Amino acid sequence: MRDMIFIHGMFQNAKSWENWIAYFEDRDYHCIAPSWPLHEGDPGYLKENPPEGLGELGLEDVLDKIETLVNDYEQPIVIGHAVGGLIAQLLLHKGLAKIAVAINSVAPNGMLDFDFNFMKYVSQIINPLKGNEPVFLEARTFHQAFANTLTEEDATEAYLKYATHDSRNVLRDCMGKAGRIETHYGHGPLLLIASEKDHIIPAALVEKNFKAYKDKESIVAMKEFSNRSHYICGEPDWEEVADYIYYWLEDHEEL
């Protein structure tokens, strides 16, 4: 049985992968989905009771936990969303993963895009004037920024069930040394997924990330899905995305 590790991004925890775990376990994968530090538990409870120290959580804290887990397996497949997508790329770069799939991924090396929504939401999160105050995600912001292709009713339901608050320092660290990758080095197969209507990670930034990989001997692919938001892994027809990834993995696992 093949090992597959799912890595969530900001404002989510392991519960966000529950449908994906069922999907891939039905296809003979052994699936593991850890929550980041201070993200364990029911998202509804976490929103009502933000863990002490959440605002100080940094990317290195998350990486330490994920790398410790990954080291228990021999060359697993890693699938990550948003910051989890950057972590998946870092694990591939370090040779800890066999294959990586990065969905609507934060880009390495401080790459930016001048899309209005991207600049708006990133600046709100990394705002230095907020210090270590956590980002307390509201249902309205979740709908506008995270799940903008959903109806307000469906976005509210998703918010209540899956959304968490989070640390500004994780994204701040992504923009610095901890988020650096030598993209001209060789690496295992990498698939980058983009969403046409993502207000947080625009497809143009995913394409910039894709084009940054320069090693001619390494496999890098990109797929953009139309009419999808940042909430691509949970919105209706998520199975189409999972199907695409499954068949891509089938084509590349033995390379």
Image: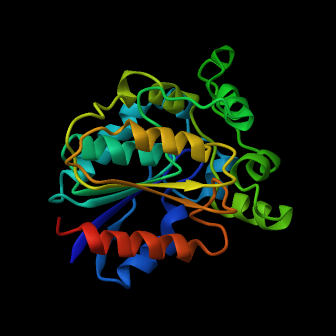
Inspect this view and state whether residue 106 appears: no
Looking at this view, is 230 or 182 the one in front? 182
Looking at this view, is 200 or 115 the one in front? 115
| Residue sticking out furthest to the front | 216
For this view, does 10 lie left or right of residue 244?
Answer: right
Q: Residue at horizontal 33%, vertical 39%?
A: 213
For this view, does 2 lie left or right of residue 245?
Answer: left
Residue 60: x and y in percent read 36, 31
245 over 103 or under it: above or below: below
Specify the quadrant that holds the C terminus: bottom left
150 over 250 or under it: above or below: above
Looking at this view, is 194 or 200 the one in front? 194
| Residue sticking out furthest to the bottom | 26
184 over 49 or under it: above or below: above
Q: Residue at horizontal 27%, vertical 58%?
A: 99
| Residue sticking out furthest to the left | 74
Residue 211: x and y in percent read 41, 40
Residue 87: x and y in percent read 38, 43
For this view, does 234 lie left or right of residue 18?
Answer: right
| Residue sticking out furthest to the top | 129
Specify the quadrant that holds the N terminus: bottom left
Q: Residue at horizontal 68%, vertical 29%?
A: 119
Inspect this view and state whether residue 73 appears: yes
Residue 173: x and y in percent read 46, 26
